Image: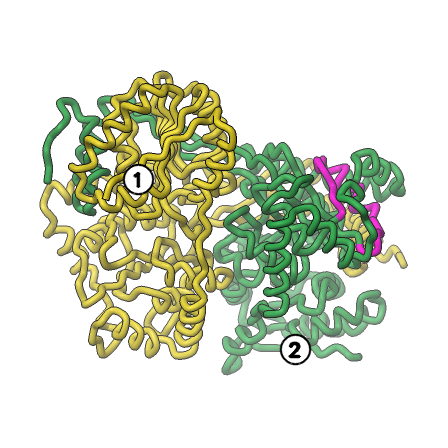
Chain colours: A yellow, B green
Amino acid sequence: MSIRIRTLDSTQDGFQQQLHALLAFEAETDDAIESSVAAILRDVKARGDAAVLEYTNRFDRVGATGMAAFEVPQEELQAALDGLPQAQRGALQTAAERIRVFHERQKHELNGFTYTEPDGTVLGQRVTPLDRVGIYVPGGKATYPSSVLMNAIPAKVAGVKDIVMVVPTPDGVKNRIVLAAAAIAGVTRVITIGGAQAVGALAYGTETIPAVDKIVGPGNAYVAAAKRRVFGTVGIDMIAGPSEILVLCDGTTDPDWVAMDLFSQAEHDELAQAILLCPDADYIAQVEASIHKLLPTMTRRETIVTSFSDRGALIKVRDMAEACAIANDIAAEHLEISAENPRQWADRIRHAGAIFLGRFSSESLGDYCCGPNHVLPTSRTARFSSPLGVYDFQKRSSIIEVSEAGAQTLGKIAAEIAYGEGLQAHARSAELRLRGAGIERP
Amino acid sequence: MSIRIRTLDSTQDGFQQQLHALLAFEAETDDAIESSVAAILRDVKARGDAAVLEYTNRFDRVGATGMAAFEVPQEELQAALDGLPQAQRGALQTAAERIRVFHERQKHELNGFTYTEPDGTVLGQRVTPLDRVGIYVPGGKATYPSSVLMNAIPAKVAGVKDIVMVVPTPDGVKNRIVLAAAAIAGVTRVITIGGAQAVGALAYGTETIPAVDKIVGPGNAYVAAAKRRVFGTVGIDMIAGPSEILVLCDGTTDPDWVAMDLFSQAEHDELAQAILLCPDADYIAQVEASIHKLLPTMTRRETIVTSFSDRGALIKVRDMAEACAIANDIAAEHLEISAENPRQWADRIRHAGAIFLGRFSSESLGDYCCGPNHVLPTSRTARFSSPLGVYDFQKRSSIIEVSEAGAQTLGKIAAEIAYGEGLQAHARSAELRLRGAGIERP
């Protein structure tokens, strides 16, 4: 299995089409998955715990006799943490602390406001946390403690009282690093269930699992389909597409570093996307050489070969300014500006999930421990959406306290527009508050 | 057609079940609509303008020969504004100005941040506006200029450069108040198309209509289905359910006022919901009398009778504290606290789209001209979502600029966790930045 390195040139005819073909990704909806998920959700809504128990026993090959078997006591979480090797425990704890510090800044930015008008009318906006959230953590091979930290800590910082984590344990095998991360993040309750049945339990509630207000966290196609279906009953985070990195390099970074940064994305899964934009053809050739040199040392080289061959590219651009323009079109999840004076280029970037400035800012540092969230908008959705944050666990309410004097001026305006819209009761409701009310209108 | 007034008592057996049955609302998905919308979207994606032109001619019964026929020039918008009666024009302009002032506060709250750590590492969050948004405005009978103001002004305040409004004109009839509102709100471009074809054109772009980044605004079942389907390609706002008002009254407000406030919601449409919570049985009887007295004077009494009979209720509660607890369960779109010292009760409210304090704060004032947005979360979604705001037209990017010194400490932490997750390239990418790099790990 040899890697295919796609090289493009922005001056070539048809470059735009080639680029868009490369970026195109449409999540397929699988009718079999959709109908299976719909049936599971209906069943969980109707039968509650009994349904969750049956599906969990069947899909995860466990033989539980009751829901209590799926509860992981806080002591077990703490024991998992205590049992980690010291270096690993320390790394997770330091990462968690840095994530908390960053997200505290987000919280402090959003305080709500009120203001009082000269006539005494008070207007404002109040920010409050969600009551209860569910965090989905995948089981099986892709078990990411970092994902537990990144999803749970913002909720905690927001002030969510109840954080219910679900994590399937196929064949009953628990991942102790994931449990340790739950202990560090302050998760309220861990339940070892997964799949559409776990999403249904969180959305509708069962006898033993309380309904939550929002469900976040990644999952397989069944989980994604289930989240889409319960949206509206509860909030959900974005349904993530494949992960992406876009590296803008001016040719001054060690090509091994850039090659490894591309690999760090490409190793995620076979649909991951890693793209380099660079104005220096010689440098691109050096990165290509580094790719060939380093690939044999990679433990996940099969995944890297597949994803990089299918969806990766090294792109020669006219100059760094053009690279920035293309970056805005791509609106990447992760954007590395590996260049001298990176801020001059960062200032031109309008769309990206996270912007990594300078050659020491490898994406992997951000993935784990810089502090900002690693749950980021994929598939060009950075054009209109944001990293997961404290704000995803808060909501706003408008505050409107109209004084008697305010009702006199506002009432006339409201009535005028309401009559124009043919909504007479709206108009009358405003007019009744006018002094000497009862002005008759048609 | 006589009104049926449902009265409940929180102390009765089965009250919780009765209340939840009353609140239950599930938007039906209509398979015929779904498949029709899917076909239209596919067609617009494939054939662009030609498809939009055909569908618009067919569904809106117009005979356009090209897309140019659907453009409304800025001069026509301005002429519509100039042609309004002075009182109406003044009311819209004052409302718009108040909406702008409120939303400027939202903008000033969200500035992003950066902070520098002792080792020189810079972390932060940048807030940027969307490039281009589409605003859907319904045509036909429900033509609401206030909706144009409420959707377009937050986008404008956010700094969105391009605001494309679509509004169908069945039989070619344009609504001049809606066009006037577009002029006031500073909409960039108005196109007289609607339905799923308009949503498709905005999401995918056509030869004459640029693809937008987000689509907001209300519409019929076809529009809602289309928005749900293009979500991911573009952002969308919430899909709104029926409008709701919940009035908490301590029995000190003129019962006519409360009855009219309930009517102002009930007149919206036959699924609208209007509920009163009050601890005073005598007062509830007075409101009931006011309902019977005022109903004959209502021009939209048929709608009021249907919606109030089907989904309305007057509920006797133990006390105002219980009313607040029930209000948190209902998580109403509009919550009026029509009481003495309303703030004591407002402090207990955790979930509501907008909170109207005091008897002069009728919902209708907020609908039109107080300043806060009238696009609010319905169907209990105020538990996890917010009024439409400037923040819906902005997104955040994380900023990560790791210093060389920072890369030394962070790199070791990241590598430790990455190896724990089995992601070796992530670990190596961090380790390459360590001084004297090349530490070999398995």
Q: What residue do we see at 32% from left, 44% from top? A: A307
Residue B278 in which image quadrant: bottom right
Tag 2: amino acid: Arg
How far across and how far down the image is residue B398, in percent? 40, 34
**Figure label count:** 2
Which of B297 and A298 lies nearest the eye of the viewer?
A298
Query: Could you tell me residue B383's position as x and y percent?
Result: 49, 58
Towards the viewer: A51 or A186? A51
The quadrant holding residue B404 is top left
The mark lying in front, picked from 2 and 1, is 1
Q: Amino acid at mark 1?
A: Gln
Specify few, some or many for label 1: CA neighbours under 10 Å numbering under 14, 14-19, or 20 or more.
Answer: many
Instruction: Tell whether position A243 is magenta.
Output: no
Chain of the residue on which disc 1 is drawn: A
Q: Position of residue B100 (x, y in %)?
A: 67, 37
Residue span colored magenta: B170-192
Q: Is residue B118 visible?
A: no
Would residue B409 be found to the left or right of residue A4 on screen?
left
Which residue has dot 1 on it? A265
Please give left or right for residue A33 compared with residue A170 in the image: right
Residue at 79% x, 71% y is B302
Q: Is residue A422 visible?
A: yes
Same subunit: marks 2 and 1: no
Distance between mark 2 and mark 1 Cα atoms = 60 Å
| Host chain of mark 2 | B
Above or below, comparing residue B309 to residue A173 in the picture: below
The residue that label 2 is drawn on is: B6
Q: Residue at x 64, y 35 (%)?
A: B162
Using the image as rendered, state which of residue A45 and residue B207 is in the foreground: B207
